[in-house]
């Protein structure tokens, strides 16, 4: 059973998938950092110095200055600012994957468009189609 599992795990598709998942997780962290640390601060500044990660609705009825303070107090909050950050993360990742798949499809389409090798040729005497390896035409019996 261990040998079968090793054979399964060492197949190309499984290894490719594992590598893709690891790289995807790392890419997701990079995109999350980009959105939270690079993209959202200027957008928040343009919208009146808003910190999106600190936008929340307090459901407990008490007042808290930040999401962290509300969480520390155990208050129920609806963190729509963090949700906006996550939506932007998703859109960036989805767009990057779309571009990647589009490029892969374009690359594989070029490989598939290569014409197949011909299997027939024209007889020089009667112009009928004969197999490429033929040395005599089946229609007019001339040597080719």
Image (cartoon, helix red, strand yellow):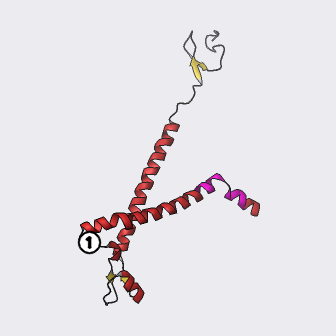
Residue at 61%, 13% in the rendered image: 139
Q: Secondary structure at mark 1?
A: loop
| Residue 16 on the magenta span | yes
Mark 1 residue crowding within 10 angstroms, few (<14) / some (14–19) / many (20+): few
Which of the 4 image quadrants contains residue 11? Answer: bottom right
Residue at 58%, 57% in the rendered image: 19
The residue labelled by disc 1 is 49
Work out whether residue 76 can be spotted: no
Tally of numbered discs: 1
Secondary structure mostly taken by the magenta-highlighted segment of the chain: helix
Which of the 4 image quadrants contains residue 137? Answer: top right
Instruction: Please identify the quadrant where the C terminus is shown.
Output: top right
- Vertical order, 1 against 142 (above or below): below
Residue 51's x, y, as percent?
A: 31, 73
Residue 6's x, y, as percent?
A: 72, 59
| Residue 10 on the magenta span | yes
- Vertical order, 74 against 13 (above or below): below
| Stretch in magenta | 5-17
Residue at 38%, 61% in the rendered image: 91
- Vertical order, 16 against 130 (above or below): below
Residue 69's x, y, as percent?
A: 37, 85
Q: Along the line of sight, which residue is nearer the eye, 44 or 89?
A: 44
Horizontal placement of 30 versus 116: left or right? left
Horizontal placement of 38 versus 45: left or right? right
Q: Along the line of sight, which residue is nearer the eye, 75 or 102?
A: 75
Work out whether residue 108 can be spotted: yes
Q: Along the line of sight, which residue is nearer the eye, 22 or 60?
A: 22
């Amino acid at each position: 059973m261990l040998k079968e599992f090793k054979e399964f795990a060492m197949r190309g598709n499984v290894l490719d998938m594992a590598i893709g998942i690891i790289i995807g997780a790392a890419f997701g962290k990079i995109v999350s950092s980009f959105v939270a640390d690079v993209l959202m601060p200027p957008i928040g500044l343009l919208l009146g110095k808003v910190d999106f990660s600190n936008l929340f609705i307090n459901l407990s009825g008490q007042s808290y200055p930040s999401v962290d303070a509300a969480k520390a107090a155990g208050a129920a909050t609806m963190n729509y600012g963090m949700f906006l950050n996550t939506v932007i993360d998703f859109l960036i990742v989805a767009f990057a994957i779309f571009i990647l798949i589009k490029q892969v499809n374009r690359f594989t389409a070029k490989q598939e468009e290569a014409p197949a090798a011909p299997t027939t040729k024209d007889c020089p005497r009667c112009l009928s189609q004969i197999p490429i390896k033929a040395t005599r035409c089946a229609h007019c019996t001339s040597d080719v």
